[in-house]
Image (cartoon, grey):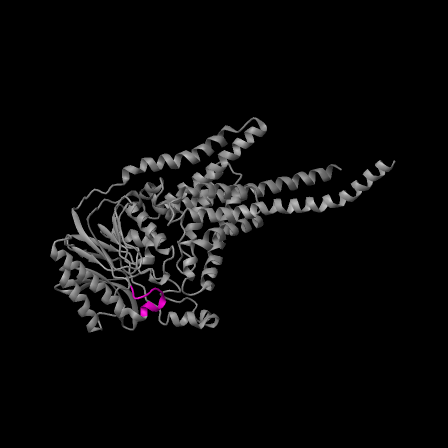
Amino acid sequence: MTVTATSVDESDRLEPQSAPASRWALRLRRLVPAAAAALSGVLLYVSFPPRTLWWLALPAFAVLGWVLRGRGWKAAFGLGYLFGLGFLLPLLVWTGVEVGPGPWLALVAIEAIFVALVGVGIAAVSKLPGSPVWAAAVWIAGEAARARAPFNGFPWGKIAFGQADGVFLPLAAVGGTPVLGFAVVLCGFGLYETVRLLVERRGTGAVRRPAAAVALLSVAVPVVGALAARTLVSDKAEDGTVTVAAIQGNVPRAGLDFNAQRRAVLEYHARETERLAAEVKAGTIAKPDIVLWPENSSDVDPFTDAEAAVAIERAAKAIDAPISVGGVVERDGKLYNEQILWDPVKGPTDTYDKRQIQPFGEYLPLRGLVGAINKNWTSMVRQDFSRGTEPGVFRMANAKVGLVTCYEAAFDWAVRSEVTDGAQLISVPSNNATFDRSEMTYQQLAMSRVRAVEHSRTVTVPVTSGVSAIIMPDGRITQRTGMFVADSLVQKVPLRSTQTPATRLGTLPETALVLVAAGGLGWAIGAGVRRRRADREDRLSREGGR
């Protein structure tokens, strides 16, 4: 009896302890999807440059497909937001390098809302036949929205921009960044659907053949399509060649205050050009036909400052070639971020004004509200830049050079317009000194590599402080500089005039994918309405039968 009584007492003591343990286990299980969503976002970030782990985007979207399948809209919004935070917080940390964490966190908080809404859409279509196709189209629709709003959009973090080293890159020539991004996301969701069906088959011993076919095709078609698209990628010269020099003059020091030393920055670029001219004269390097300086290489307006004009003219005459100079000029009381074509004999002969200017960097939206929050921000952007209205294609030597100034490289339309206007070569003059040694310069360099393949053009990237590079039409970097060093790159590059399908089609592939997304969401919403109506009628029927 004593032994039995003791056993009963011990079980009584253990029973109340097991209930809290099970509750904790339940709570932990509920946290798994949230943790998985955030970590898969981090995994997507790791797939982006400067790393070359492009393939990590596939498991990132596979996990996202798993956590969102069958979720209600509230849960899907929250999980999508966590995915967005995991991805964008580390990806965009460079935006706070010089201005502190406030703008960085605000930008990420806003951009992650787009990802959260995409999460709701993916969850809605997750149980439709062919769900990977609908879900991938919904993601691209979200990217299309982010590229346009707010403040004229912020396309940074497009999936295509993480694929410069990947097997899918040739698809950029087929339909631009939307088709390239769609293929990657489709493959990721198809990977999840394949694994899910394999698990389902192991549990039930059967699997629906149409569903299995869609899952396998979602993985196979993007890969096969990318391999087939390689025929569109070529670095052969069609209109001869041109020897180009990209000048990186460096800056006195990193940070926003380098603009206070703008005369020194101009002198650095003139000096590096003259150093290159001395090497050409000595016969140690080929003479360039054209010379490309970066954005902000002359923040001293050469149209109003005689010393600045003399410095540029001295460099142009020394190298005996036309120079595209990045300047800040004022006309009729308006500021412009301008590229100036400076001929060694004729002086300035053409200009291009940047069209896609950067919010909170080159102009300040909601200036009154922002000033009330932090007066330092308004002091950093004392006067808004004005937008250009026309594409910029400079005739330099025997080449038509399309200008895409820094931030513009992230926008599909800004690059395409130069090619359709006749550019045989693209220059992306940039100024990354503000962002120190962050990943920003490598992310932007990857964009230029994607653009090279998208439009089958050589792309030169002259940057004030690095990384400057020369990129072939097949996306290969053939030369690059270090960061925060004075250097120059000289190379004979091919000139091309063929327009890829992506160039000819423009926004049509993106529009088609947005329509696919709308069709999937419409189908899902309609199915949900019919299901609720059937459930209500069934409930009323049962109640009437009582």
On the picture, is 372 further left or further right than 420? right
Near-viewer residue (142 or 403) = 403
Residue at image coords 41%, 58%: 94
- Name the residue at the top extreme: 205
Q: Is residue 321 visible?
A: no
256 versus 443 height, above or below: below
Quarter residue 324 falls in:
bottom left
Residue 29 image point, x, y percent: 61, 44
Residue 10 image point, x, y percent: 79, 41
Near-viewer residue (533 or 286) = 286
Residue 527 image point, x, y percent: 55, 41
Residue 155 image point, x, y percent: 39, 54
On the picture, is 90 further left or further right than 357? right
- Name the residue at the right extreme: 1
Q: Quadrant of the C terminus?
A: top right
Region in magenta: 251-259
Figure label count: 0
- Name the residue at the front extreme: 2
Residue 354 magenta-highlighted: no
Near-viewer residue (513 or 89) = 89
Q: Quadrant of the N terminus?
A: top right
On the picture, is 316 further left or further right than 187? left
Near-viewer residue (102 or 339) = 102
Q: Is residue 51 visible?
A: yes
7 versus 336 height, above or below: above
On the picture, is 348 further left or further right than 387? left
Residue at image coords 36%, 42%: 166
